[in-house]
Amino acid sequence: MRPHLKKYLLGYLAVILILGSFIIGYGTGIEEGKKNLSVTVVAPGENEGTIKNKDEKPPAYLSKDVDFRLFWDVWKLVKDRYVDTNVPDTQIFYGALSGLLTSLKDPYSTFLDPEINQKFSEELSGSFEGVGMEIGSKHGQLVVVAPLPGTPASRAGLRAGDKILAIDKFDTMGIAVDYAVSKIRGKGGTAVVLSVHRNEWPKPKDISLVRERISIPSARLEMKGDIAYVKLTHFNADTTEKFRKVVNDLLLKNPKSIVFDMRNNAGGFLDTAVDVAGEWVEDGVLVTEKLRQGEGERTHEARGRARLKDMKTVVLVNEGSASAAEIVAGALKDYNLATLIGKKTFGKGSVQELENLPDGSAVKITVAKWYTPKGTSIDQNGITPDIEIDLKDEDYENDRDPQLDAAIKFLHGEKVESQKEVK
């Protein structure tokens, strides 16, 4: 991606955060800054350089309320007194930038250093090294949002909603999601141990996962008799093209109805969500973004060919369906174009903008909250399916899928009711 290219993201609850300091500087100090002295910066594997633009003035509106000399005061304090004199200035400088985003207390706004930004771009393209799951944060607790099929996380039996209490014995309570990702990710062939708790378990379990190259198949089609089963795992850069091919193949098979499975789909690009929903919605608003105060809102209209609008559809969702997946599910539900079956979705109702910076780093920042066509916000609330069906541990262990079974029964005209919650 080119510098300054803006991408709008709805998903990837688990993006990557540099291990940075939460202090706000490291270097020479205010006196040296005033004199505009050259300061040596040494980063691993780089030649020596100098800190540039030390005397850059903050915006006028900040000077009224913020004494920017404090930055240089802390800069000097750390430079003069921190016990380890070998910490690269660039590392702490990036940590300071990270701190700017951390101060927003928004788990989806973050600074990505050049190395991590490259890895993030790889993930959006559909390939990375790790254990194969999306993670998020609820009430300060790190949780599994979606294990990807055929990955170490999926093979180990991890499920959406599992709580990750520790990563290699590192306590995760209150940890930034992106920092957690940086600890879980790693070179293929290496192992990471997660301490995991599930509501049905009497106590947490330690689960060892061996990292590997993860390739994400965005869309696939399978026929189940006269029903087309379409599985969508992500809304990546290549998903629109792959999904259109799936729809082309589907129409050639002339099915009577569709099961559209977005369980454990943690999201991706906003434009991709609009493209996918447009295969059902012929015209009208698919999603509305409410921007920051004073900037109003913008709407995204259906722009697809609505080739599936007349086909009876069930959408499968669960606790791992998030963000872009929730936009599509919400639009199809609001327009009465599909029946939702499964469990309540994750509840991520914000939009992030990815701004690439000249040095290869990037800022991913929340720029809007999104609403369904009927004006419903799902942020922190999720979408409740029309028919609630659970999928329990024993179902996993015995290769049963009661949610898919319910969808097929419903499409065959059989009566399917929500399960009664047993407490």
Image (spheres, helix red, strand yellow):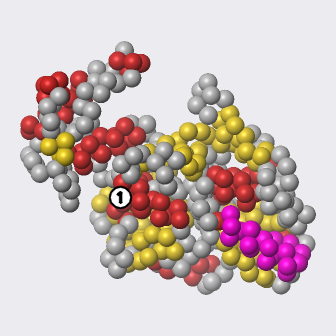
**Residue under the image location 17 percent in, 24 percent down:** 34
Can you say which quadrant of the picture contains the C terminus? bottom right
Residue 72, quarter of picture? top left
Residue 261, quarter of picture? bottom right
**Residue under the image location 29 percent in, 64 percent down:** 169
Locate residue 196, reporting x and y percent.
42, 67
Q: Is residue 243 left or right of residue 160?
A: right
Nearest the viewer among 300 and 261 is 300
Locate residue 66, reporting x and y percent.
33, 21
Locate residue 251, reporting x and y percent.
85, 75
**Residue under the image location 39 percent in, 18 percent down:** 60
What's the residue type where badge 1 is placed?
Glu
Q: Is residue 18 visible?
A: yes
SS category of the residue bearing label 1 = helix
Q: Is residue 393 visible?
A: no
Magenta-drawn stretch contains 251: yes
Nearest the viewer among 209 and 81 is 81
**Residue furthest top in the image:** 64
Bounds of the magenta span?
240-263
Magenta-drawn stretch contains 350: no
Look at the picture and state if 7 lies above or below 61: below
Question: 10 Å neighbourhood of mark 1: few (<14), some, or many (≥20)?
Answer: few
Q: Is residue 234 left or right of residue 362?
A: right
Nearest the viewer among 268 and 181 is 268
Look at the picture and state if 326 lies above or below 202: above
Residue occupied by mark 1: 115
Locate residue 202, reporting x and y percent.
45, 68
Q: How many marks?
A: 1
**Residue under the image location 62 percent in, 34 percent down:** 291
